[in-house]
Every structure is written in structure tokens, then in C-alpha cells.
Amino acid sequence: VQLQASGGGLVQAGGSLRLSCVTSGSILRANYMAWYRQTPGKQRELVASITSGGSINYADSVKGRFTIPKDNAKNTVSLQMSSLRPEDTAVYYCNAVIDGLGYWGQGTQVTVSS
């Protein structure tokens, strides 16, 4: 299984970005998909997750600003980010749990300028 993440970039504070993560196989096999982020010297932290049953969880820091839409037909889970803040600057990673195994996509850099 491969996860291909895209959509990062540079944006001004208050702006929006949409990250996408495409799975090489059917996304319907995933029990859990999520976006994490990491900044230098810090642990990777959960940003948002969605289960196969549709349960969604957001980090407190992004509630009300980020959403995690999933498109089964396109085997894609996205991270729609709005009202971005400089503290959202990080490398963002998508993650999937499929048949009990965890998979990571390559990171995509998001930089929010003040």
C-alpha cells in the first residue's frame, strides 16, 4: 500500500490550503485514516482522523478550522485547512491503518507566513 500526499505550500496567515492523500488501493480497506504534522524537534502530532465508520476526531488546535473529507470513489482523504496560522507550519503526513498495519505517506510541507 502506498500513500501519496500532495497540496502543501506557502500561504499567508488567514489563508486556506487543501492537502490530499491518495491510496494505491481501495480506501474502503482502511479502518482508519489520519493526518499528522511534525515540526523540528517535536513529536509527530495527530491533526485529524476519520474511521471507516465515519467517526471524526480533530486536535483541539484545529477544531473549527480544519476538516477531513474522504472520497471513497477517488481513494482520497483530504485535509481542508482554513484560517491558517503561523503555528500550523509543519510537515504534514497522511496515515492509514489497513488490515491492522500502519502506513505513512511522504510528508508535505505547509508554511504559513505571518
Image (spheres, helix red, strand yellow):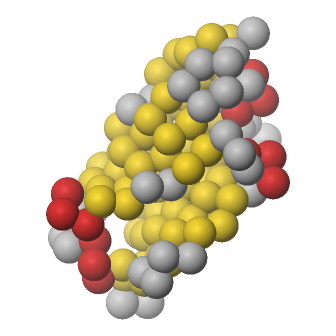
Q: Quick one: quadrant of the N terminus?
A: bottom left
Who's the residue at 47% across and 68% down the image? 33
The quadrant where residue 12 appears: top right
Q: Quick one: quadrant of the C terminus?
A: top right
In the displayed structure, 83 sits above or below 21; it is: above
Residue closest to the eye, 98 or 56: 56
Who's the residue at 67% across and 40% down the image? 65
**Residue 78 seen in the current view:** yes
Residue closest to the eye, 92 or 51: 51
Who's the residue at 73% across and 50% down the image? 63
Q: Residue furthest bottom?
A: 99
With 83 as the anchor, is 56 left or right in this view? left
Residue closest to the eye, 22 or 57: 57
Image location of residue 28, percent across then percent down: 28, 78
The quadrant where residue 91 appears: top right
Image location of residue 83, percent across then percent down: 67, 27
**Residue 101 seen in the current view:** no
Who's the residue at 49% across and 29% down the image? 17
Image location of residue 20, percent across then percent down: 37, 45
Image location of residue 93, percent across then percent down: 51, 50
In the displayed structure, 78 sits above or below 27; it is: above
